[in-house]
Amino acid sequence: MEFTMIETGWMSILPPIIAIALALITKEVYSSLFIGIMSGMLIYSFVGNGTIVSAVAMTFDMMCSKIADNAYMIIFLALLWAVVSLVAESGGSEAYGRWVGKKLRSKMAAAFATSFLGILIFIDDGFNCLTVGTVMRPITDRLRISREKLAYIIDATAAPVCIIAPVSSWAVAVASEVSETNGFNVFLSTIPYNFYALMTILMVFFISFTGRDFGPMKKAEMEAEKHSEDVNDSLTVNNGKGHVIDLVLPILVLIICAILGMAYVGGFFEGVSFSEAIGYNPTAGLSLGAFAGLITAFILYIPRKLMKPKEFVECIVKGIGNIVPPMLILILSWSLGGVCRQLIGTGVFISGFVSTSNMPLGFLPVLIFIIAALMSFSMGTSWGTFGMLIPIITMICETEGAGIYLIPALGATLAGSVYGDHCSPISDTTILASTGADCKHIRHVETQLPYATLVAAVCAVGYLIAGFMLTPWIAILAETVILLGTIMILSRKKEAQKTC
C-alpha cells in the first residue's frame, strides 16, 4: 500500500510520547507500542478527513508493509533460534562443561572461562545466559565462586556482547530500525560509541583477573568462601551423549557462512568491495548462515542418534516459538516508526524544532544515553527502548548540521538501552541470568546494580567528551582510566574497612 505523508504539527510527536509514557507507567511494551501506532493513525485520519475504521485498517496495512520489508530478518531470527534450541538440547553444552571442568583449578581461571564462553556464544543473549549458566555453575560452585558473581558474569557477557556482535539477532534488529539504505554499516559504525558494552566487558575481565570486588558482591563472595554450594547436575541433558563439537561446530559454521553469505548476496565474488557487499542485504546473507548452521546440526546429531528426526523438528518448532515475543516488539516498533516517518511528519516537526533550538548539539549523546537508560530500566526491555528511540534519533539528526551526531547518538541509544536491560529487575535477560546461575533473582539484582551503575556513570562522562570532540577514542581512554581507578579505590576501601 502507498502511504502519503501530511504535516500534523505538534500532534506528530504524540504517538511516540504516548507509547513511551504508557510503557513506563504499565511496564508493558506490547500494548504501549500498539496504542502509540493507533494514536498516530487516528491523528492521520482526523487531519486527513478519514474515519476510525480507516485508521484501524491502515494500522494493519502498516504492520503488513513492515513485515514484508523485513521478511529476511524474520526468516533469519527464526532459523537462528532453531539452531539455538538444537544446540541447547544436543548435549554439547554439557560436554563442554565436563571438558572445561577438568582444566580449571582456580577461581580466576573459572571466572575467565565463564567470561570467554559468554563472549563465544554471542548469537543471542537468552541462549547465552542459560547455556553458560548450565555449563559453568558446577565448576564455579566447586571453586567457591558465588552464584551472584556467576550471574553477573553471565549477564555482563550477554546483552553487552550481543549488541556489538555483527552476527547476532541484536545487530540485525538494530540495523532494521535505522532509516538508512545501509543500516548494517551504520550499526557497525556505532560499535566504538557503544561505551556501556565496551566498558562492561572490560570490567568483567578486570574483576575476573584481579578479584577486586566491592559492595554487595564482595559480601556474596566472602559468604561463598565460607559456605560453598553443592554441585548441581540437575540440568544434564541428553544422557551425556553430546560432545564439545556439538556446541562449537554449528555456531562456528553459522558465523563463517553468515559472513560468506553476506558477501555472496552483495556481489563480493563478482567484484564488489567487501564493505559494500556485506551491507547490501545483510539479513539475506545471515539467513544463509543460519540455515547452514541448521544443516550442520542435522548432520551432526541425527546419524549419531543424539536426536530422532521427529525430536529434531520439534526442537526447531520450539526454538522458533521462543522468538515470537521479541519479534512482536520489532514489528510494532517498525510500524510506529513508519507512522511517524511516512504519515504524520514527525521528522519534519522535530527537525524544525531542533534547527531553532539553542541547545548545543554536543550534549545530545549524553542526554540520549540518560533517557534510554531510564526507559530501559523502567520497562525492562532494550529492544523496546531502542525500537522507540532510534526513529526519533534519526529524525533529529536529519536536521541541517546535526547529521554528524547520528552515529554518536545511535551509539548512546544502544548503550543506554543495554544498561537497563542489564540490570532492570523486570528484564528478561536479568531473569534468565539469575535462572542460569541458579541464584535468587533479587540477590542478582542487588549485587549487580552497583557494578552496572558505576559503568553507566563513567559512560556518561564519555558521552560528554565524545559529543563535543566527535571521536570515540579519547572518550574510551578516559573511561578506561576512570573505571579501573574507581574499581581499585572502592575495593581497597572495603578491604581497609575490613582490616579496621
Image: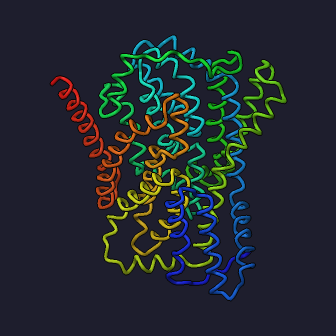
**Quadrant into which the C terminus falls:** top left
Query: In which quarter of the view is residue 99 placed?
Result: top right
Q: Above or below — where is 45 with respect to 80? A: below
Q: Is residue 203 visible?
A: yes
Q: Outermost residue, left direction?
A: 500
Q: How is the image coloured?
A: rainbow
The residue lying toward the viewer, choosing from 378 and 361, is 378
x, y (%) of residue 355? Answer: 39, 78
The residue depicted at 66 percent of the width and 80 percent of the height is: 4
Q: Above or below — where is 360 with respect to 148? A: below
x, y (%) of residue 174? Answer: 55, 54
The residue lying toward the viewer, choosing from 299 and 358, is 358
The residue lying toward the viewer, choosing from 49 and 294, is 49
Q: So how many labels did they put on this image?
A: 0
Q: Outermost residue, right direction?
A: 310
**Quadrant into which the N terminus falls:** bottom right
Relative horizontal placement of residue 436, taking residue 238 as reference (left or right): left
x, y (%) of residue 481? Answer: 25, 41
Q: Above or below — where is 478 with respect to 239? A: below
Q: Is residue 269 visible?
A: no
Relative horizontal placement of residue 388, taking residue 310 as reference (left or right): left
The residue depicted at 51 percent of the width and 22 percent of the height is: 137
Relative horizontal placement of residue 31, taking residue 295 as reference (left or right): left
